[in-house]
Amino acid sequence: MSETTVWRIWQTAKLKPHRVETFKFSTDPDLVAKVRDVVGLYMAPPERAIVLSVDEKTQIQALDRTAPMLPMKPGQVERHTHDYKRNGTTSLFAALEVATGKVTTQARARHTAADFLAFLRQVERAYPDGDLAVVLDNVSSHKTPDVLKWLQANPRVSFHFTPTSASWMNQIETWFGILSRQAIRRGSFRSVKELIERISTFTAQWNEGSTPFRWVKTADQILARRSASRQLQVNRDTSEAAGSPAAAACLSRYAAQDMAQAADSARGPDRKPGPLDATWLEATQRLGCRPNRPSRWSER
């Protein structure tokens, strides 16, 4: 098969073999209810209620390069050493106000249930009025007896859990990604204190011009996509043919055409069928496709 044929197959079937994505299907028995609950809070929050997306980013490392970074200059990219020195870690608790994009943070040495509870108290003080609807994941430190007892003592705070294996539904995860890219990943920190100061500075600047993330997918759209993805995976697991139907069709058409052209080229001056003709016929039958032969092919 020629390189051009491979390229045509990829283009027609919209295949991108250089790209890889990950996925995971949630097996949460309450998936539908949780999706509708969380998406409902994002798209139609209750009146006089504040929706907060809460999570923790654990084990953020204070890394210091072994030599000073060389800044970017004309004709040369920024450069830094590939090795580094570890100067400790911190865990960051954060709450994103869904309506405004404002973020409340607290850095802690650990990320235990006690640390989470201390952050909840900070959040509760930061929002003294109105009900607080807190969207969070299913980590065990969010469900300890002490946390549940605190919830009972503070009835205006309610927890709304995302489905298992669906952390992407928690909007604070998007902010954590922005924080990593813009403030941490390319930084150099000689101590945990420097790291925390950088995070605090970034958060303050973010809050000065904060804008909310806009949630666009309805619960029905998410659940329909999930059902379609599950069915596609089942089809792939049970199918004997490799690849998607579109890819198989393109492979059949173009591969068979290449074989036909090769068989035609292998014929002698007398145009009698050659050894590749049988190969071509067998391949087209196996692939379930028989494309038009080249115009110069003469039927015998």
Image (cartoon, rainbow, N blue to C red):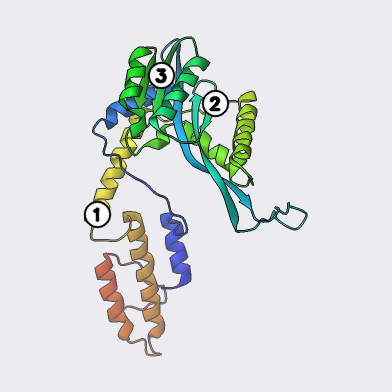
Q: Secondary structure at mark 2?
A: strand
Earlier in the chain: of badge 2 and badge 3, it is 2
| Left or right: residue 163 compared with residue 83 | left
Give neighbour class at mark 2: few <14, some 14-19, many 20+ (Cα, 10 Å).
many
Give the residue at x 70% y 55%.
Answer: 77
Residue with the mark numbered 1: 237
- The image quadrant where one finds the N terminus is bottom left
Q: Where is residue 289? Give x, y as percent.
A: 29, 65
What's the amino acid at mark 3? Ala
Residue with the mark numbered 2: 103
Q: Is residue 273 visible?
A: no
| Left or right: residue 67 compared with residue 177 | right
Look at discs 2 and 1 and give the one toward the viewer.
2
Distance between the Cα atoms at labels 2 and 1? Answer: 43 Å
Give the residue at x 45% y 24%.
Answer: 118
Residue with the mark numbered 3: 133
What's the amino acid at mark 2? Val
